[in-house]
Image (cartoon, rainbow, N blue to C red):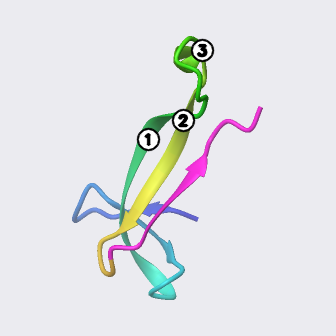
């Protein structure tokens, strides 16, 4: 479970590489998944992106699995 940290604007979350709770920067990015230029504007999906401050490991997870 993510918790806020009063020292920074980041979140503490479990890091798979560090194998401990570390400070992460968390953001949301829109990713275009379709390859067709005509329909690309309709194929954007939100992804939750997090990066470990300690080791730099970065991963993302699709937020809308419809």
Is 58 above or below relative to 38?
below
> In the displayed structure, does residue 23 sit left or right of residue 40?
left
Q: CA distance from mark 3 to mark 1?
A: 22 Å
Q: Quadrant of the C terminus?
A: top right
Question: Badge 3 local density, few (<14 within 10 Å), some, or many (20+)?
Answer: few
List x then y, in percent, for residue 65: 74, 38
User: Is residue 29 inside the magenta stretch?
Assistant: no
Q: Which residue is mark 2?
A: 46
Residues drawn in magenta? 56-66
Residue for badge 3: 39
**Residue 20 in the image: above or below residue 33:** below
Q: Residue at x 59, y 34 (%)?
A: 33
First in residue order: circle 1 vs circle 2? 1
Pointers 3 and 1 in contact (CB under 8 A)?
no
- At numbered mark 3, what does the secondary structure look like: helix, strand or loop? loop
Secondary structure of the residue carrying numbered label 2: strand
Vertical position of residue 4 compared to residue 65: above or below: below
Q: Earlier in the sequence, mark 3 or mark 2?
A: 3
- Residue 1 image offset from top left, x and y in percent: 58, 65
Residue picked out by circle 1: 28
């Amino acid at each position: 479970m993510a918790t806020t940290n009063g020292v920074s604007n980041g979140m503490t979350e479990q890091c798979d590489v560090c194998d401990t709770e570390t400070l992460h920067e968390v953001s949301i990015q829109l990713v275009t998944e379709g390859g067709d230029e005509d329909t690309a504007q309709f194929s954007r999906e939100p992804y939750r992106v997090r990066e470990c401050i300690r080791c730099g490991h970065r991963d993302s997870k699709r937020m809308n699995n419809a």
